[in-house]
Structures are given as structure tokens and as C-alpha cells.
Image: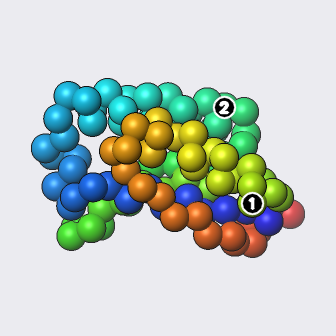
Amino acid sequence: MAFLYRLLPPRPTFAQDMDPAEAEAMERHTAYWQDLLDREVAVAFGPVLHPQEPWGLGLLDLEDQKAAQAIGDGDPAVASGTCTYELLPMLLVRPG
């Protein structure tokens, strides 16, 4: 089992017009997800460059939905009130 984490920005133009507090929250968000990636809790993360509705994607390699929700709730972009998120279970296909 795995989880797709979908980070939802407060507005479509967020990447272009975030204020200093939002930018600081997003810097902490990036460091948070880089740590998850380094610890192999996250498989990947990054922005989805949809032309009208960009959003952030994280793939979590976890069996426990409560643990995945705790990661989502603890994301600085969410905890600061800057963004919201959705969490969707998925099957993670592994090589070999």
C-alpha cells in the first residue's frame, strides 16, 4: 500500500504571487518532504505543472493511513494554513 498526497494551493496563481509568509511556509514544506524522501518514507514529490490548476504531489510508501495523515497534517504548508491536502490510497508497483 502507498498513498498519493495531493497538496492543494490556495489559488491557481500561488506559485507566482505568494507573499513572504507563504514563501517561508513553502520553503519549510520542501525541506520537510526532502527529509521524507531521504528517509525513504516518500518515493517522490514535486509540483504538477497543470496549466490551469497546478498542485503538489507526494508519494508515500506506508501501510498505515493514520501515519500518512499525520505526515499530511504535519506538512508546514498545511500546518501553517497556507494549503490543504487530499490523501488517496494506491497500490505501489515495485520493480522486479
Please report the residue visible at 74 percent of the width from the left and 49 percent of the height from the top. Answer: 67
Left or right: residue 78 versus residue 39 is: left
Which of pointers 1 and 2 indicates the residue nearer the eye? 1
**Relative to 90, does residue 14 appear above or below in the rendering?**
above
Where residue 10 sits in the image (x, y, percent)? 27, 55
- The front one of 80 and 18 is 80
Where residue 75 sits in the image (x, y, percent)? 52, 40
Residue under label 2, please give it: 38
Q: Quadrant of the C terminus?
A: bottom right
- The front one of 1 and 78 is 78
Q: How many marks?
A: 2
Mark 2 and mark 1 in contact (Cβ < 8 Å)?
Answer: no
Mark found first going from the N terminus, 1 or 2: 2
Please report the residue visible at 67 percent of the width from the left and 62 percent of the height from the top. Answer: 3
**Relative to 32, does residue 66 appear above or below in the rendering?**
below
- The CA distance from mark 1 to mark 2 is 20 Å
Task: Look at label 2 and name its amino acid.
Answer: Asp
Left or right: residue 9 versus residue 34 is: left
- The front one of 62 and 78 is 78
Q: In the current view of this chain or complex, which residue is farthest to the left?
A: 17
Q: Quadrant of the N terminus?
A: bottom right
Q: In terms of image quadrants, where is residue 84?
A: bottom left
Q: Tell me if mark 1 has few (under 14), some (14-19) or many (20+) residues whose alpha carbon lies within 10 angstroms of its own.
A: some
Please report the residue visible at 64 percent of the width from the left and 37 percent of the height from the top. Answer: 36
Task: Look at label 1 and name its amino acid.
Answer: Gln
Q: Tell me if mark 2 has few (under 14), some (14-19) or many (20+) residues whose alpha carbon lies within 10 angstroms of its own.
A: few
Left or right: residue 18 versus residue 43 is: left
Q: Which mark is residue 65?
A: 1
Where residue 8 sits in the image (x, y, percent)? 38, 59
Does any portion of residue 61 appear in the rendered image? no
Q: Secondary structure at mark 1?
A: helix
Q: Secondary structure at mark 2?
A: helix
